[in-house]
Image (cartoon, rainbow, N blue to C red):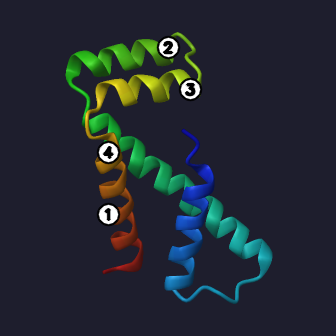
Amino acid sequence: METQPTLETFVEGILKEKAFSNLEPEVEAQMKEDLLGRLDDVINRALLDELSEDKMSEFEKLLDGGANKDELQMFLEKNIDNMEAVVTAALLKFRSMYLGA
């Protein structure tokens, strides 16, 4: 599942809502990059919080073993029943924090 274009669109929407629509291209690109990094952190933290201790241990072994992004994604999808809802909640939380709502 490729989410990066969707996350980029989400971040662009937040910047517009924050009234940052007339930024210099370089500044806008840097802000998008920074927000995408922070958003990624919020989503990852939310997903990891859903794993049991046993599953977290398995996940860490995958990381230590050099698992690629697709393998990690498959592990999370298999072990988090409500993954889509967790990601949606993380997006809403991030939006609320960033916009100060």
Q: Which residue is mark 2?
A: 64
Q: Which mark is residue 93?
A: 1
Pointer 1 with pointer 3, Cβ within 8 A: no
Identified by mark 3, the residue type is Asp
Q: At numbered mark 1, what does the secondary structure look like: helix, strand or loop? A: helix
Q: N-terminal of the two: label 4 or label 3?
A: 4
Residue 70: give its label. Answer: 3
Q: Nearer the viewer, residue 14 or 60?
A: 14
Quarter of the picture containing the C terminus is bottom left
The answer to which quarter of the image holds residue 61 is: top left
Q: Are marks 1 and 4 in contact (CB under 8 Å)?
A: yes
Gap between marks 3 and 2 measured at Cα = 15 Å
Q: Residues within 10 Å of mark 1 (few under 14, many from 20)?
A: some
> Residue 64, image x and y in percent?
49, 13
Question: Closer to us: mark 4 or mark 3?
Answer: 3
What residue did someone put label 4 on? 46
Q: What's the CA distance linking mark 1 and mark 3?
A: 25 Å
* Mark found first going from the N terminus, 1 or 4: 4
Label 3, residues with CA under 10 Å away: few <14, some 14-19, many ≥20: few
Residue at 63% across, 55% down: 5
Asked if residue 59 lies left or right of residue 55, the reply is right
Q: Quadrant of residue 26?
A: bottom right
Residue type, mark 4 in image: Ala
Q: Position of residue 45 (x, y in %)?
A: 35, 43
